[in-house]
């Protein structure tokens, strides 16, 4: 099946901004293109939960009037964007993928949506999320699973799977997601686009329904790393971090994923070739195991706290799999949470030492290709692998530590996309995007050759 080619496939934020300012298009035209693409493509992908056609067209008309009058809010001005259904948009239903919130309509925008609007972006709709964002597979939602544009029988990843599918299919050029253990980077990797999880709290999470308050991040999905960076600079509210000083080349080291998760060797080879890394570093198996246990303890306890009343009052409204996971999370003793918070501080120093001689670490975002929708086990290199741990294995450590992480396309395995994940210390974001640009240029050269 050919990959959907929506109106925004191959058109970057910079391209669209130029078209608007050269009067080759209007914001109303772009929004109408997005709405038309959703009408045609979304029935097969289920990327969108709600489309706000009236509100989007009204906002687009205002954006056009501002531009015509000399008011220019920057590169996002007039561009259609989508927002994950965990993020509040005033006057637009927010379901969190759950029957618990059927009919709920928030009265105020989340802080990140306010920032988008202030930058002139036009919200066209809300995208599908795994119920309450509690799952990396993206296929447990009250409105059904989101599907991968490369193969609708495959997962689009979770929990921001709708945002990933919407961008990958070219329905919109940019979408917001949330990322607690990889929920921006996993869909980006398996859908063949870019996804950026910034440092913890770099983008305010006010107005975002929580999954795990000390692990939650707001992130961006787009066609290119540059588009992620443009959006991030507006969302972060401070220019997106410091600029780079000096002209030394970015020092990229390959972080051997073997100690963390034994994935598909074909994925590892493909991503390693795309990384451009000259050196190699490694986490010990003990540190990798402690990161995994720390993540699970923090997420489980914080998520159980968020849903305690719903679990008691109306458990039947949860998806059965999500309910089972929540009940297991509620059984975790409090001392595990306290110890996990202590371990988190120590692990930040241990893992941070990997950056003493390198600026950026490179590794796969996801160690397997996109699994079939509904699969919980799949065969990888002749053995059975549990899907959920596989999807989370290489992304969740950076939520525990709060380090910025960017996923970019690295190639394909079995005609499905795989992603290169680049990680840096907070404050080194310019180096992260520079490394991404270098990897993308090298990939383009290989493809052209």
Image (tube, rainbow, N blue to C red):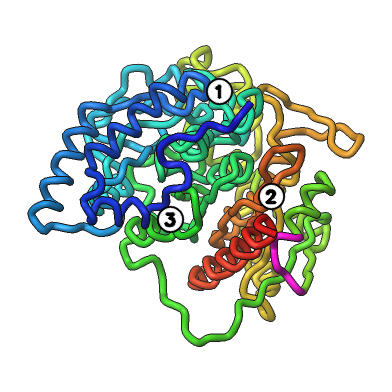
Q: How far apart in space, not on screen, are marks 2 and 3 (Cα)?
A: 19 Å
Does label 3 or label 1 sit earlier along the sequence?
1
Between discs 1 and 2, the one toward the N terminus? 1
Q: Which mark is residue 74?
A: none
CA–CA distance in space, label 3 to label 1:
26 Å
Q: Is residue 330 visible?
A: no
Residue visible at 43% across and 60% down in the picture: 229
Q: Nearer the viewer, mark 3 or mark 1?
A: 3
Crowd tier of the residue under label 3, counting other residues whose Cα lies within 10 Å: few below 14, some 14–19, many 20 or above? many
- 37 relative to 233, above or below: above
Residue holding disc 1: 145
**Whole-percent x and y of residue 294?**
67, 51
| Most foreground residue, 372 or 105 | 372
Residues 70 and 183: in front is 70
Magenta residue span: 273-278
The residue under label 2 is: 411
Q: Residue at x 35, y 33 (%)?
A: 34
The residue that label 3 is drawn on is 227
Disc with the residue nearer the chain's start (2 vs 3): 3
Closest to the camera, between mark 1 and mark 2, is 2
Q: Is residue 407 left or right of residue 132?
A: right
SS state under label 3: helix
427 vs 37: above or below: below
Can you give x and y, in whole percent of width and height, for residue 59 in the image? 19, 38
Q: Residue at x 68, y 46 (%)?
A: 418
Depicted 34 relative to depicted 219: above or below: above
69 displayed left or right of 53: left
- Secondary element under disc 2, as helix, strand or loop, is strand
């Amino acid at each position: 099946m050919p990959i959907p080619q929506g109106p925004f496939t191959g058109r970057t934020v910079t391209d669209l901004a130029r078209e608007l300012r050269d009067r080759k298009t209007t914001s109303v035209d772009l929004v109408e293109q997005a709405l038309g693409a959703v009408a045609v493509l979304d029935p097969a992908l289920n990327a969108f939960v709600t489309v706000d056609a009236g509100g989007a067209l009204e906002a687009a008309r205002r954006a056009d009037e501002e531009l015509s009058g000399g008011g220019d809010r920057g590169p996002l001005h007039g561009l259609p964007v989508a927002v994950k259904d965990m993020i509040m948009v005033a006057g637009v239903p927010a379901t969190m993928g759950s029957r618990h919130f059927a009919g709920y309509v928030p009265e105020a925008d989340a802080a990140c949506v306010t920032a988008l609007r202030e930058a002139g972006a036009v919200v066209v709709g809300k995208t599908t999320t795994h119920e309450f964002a509690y799952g990396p597979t993206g296929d447990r939602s009250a409105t059904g699973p989101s599907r991968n544009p490369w193969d609708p029988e495959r997962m689009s990843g979770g929990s921001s799977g709708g945002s990933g599918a919407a961008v990958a299919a070219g329905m919109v050029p940019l979408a917001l997601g949330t990322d607690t253990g990889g929920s921006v980077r996993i869909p980006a990797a398996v859908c063949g686009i870019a996804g950026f999880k910034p440092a913890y709290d770099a983008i305010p999470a006010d107005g975002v329904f929580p999954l795990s308050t000390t692990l939650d991040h707001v992130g961006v999905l787009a066609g290119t790393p540059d588009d992620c960076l443009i959006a991030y600079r507006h969302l972060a509210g401070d220019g997106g971090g410091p600029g780079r000083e000096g002209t030394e080349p970015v020092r990229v080291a390959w972080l051997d994923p073997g100690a963390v998760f034994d994935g598909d060797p074909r994925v590892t080879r493909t991503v390693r070739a795309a990384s451009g890394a000259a050196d190699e570093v490694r986490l010990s198996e003990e540190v990798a195991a402690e990161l995994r246990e720390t993540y699970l303890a923090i997420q489980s306890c914080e998520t159980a706290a968020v849903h305690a009343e719903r679990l008691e009052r109306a458990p039947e409204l949860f998806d059965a799999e999500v309910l089972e996971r929540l009940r297991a999370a509620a059984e975790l003793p409090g001392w595990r949470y306290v110890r996990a918070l202590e371990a988190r501080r120590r692990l930040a120093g241990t893992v941070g030492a990997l950056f003493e001689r390198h600026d950026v670490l490179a590794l796969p975002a996801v160690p397997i290709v996109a699994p079939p929708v509904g699969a919980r086990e799949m065969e990888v290199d002749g053995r059975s692998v549990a899907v959920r741990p596989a999807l989370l294995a290489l992304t969740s450590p950076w939520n525990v530590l709060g380090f910025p992480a960017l996923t970019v396309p690295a190639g394909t395995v079995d005609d499905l996309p795989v992603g290169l994940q680049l990680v840096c210390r907070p404050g080194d974001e310019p180096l992260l995007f520079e490394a991404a640009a270098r990897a993308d240029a090298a990939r383009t050269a290989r493809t052209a050759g």
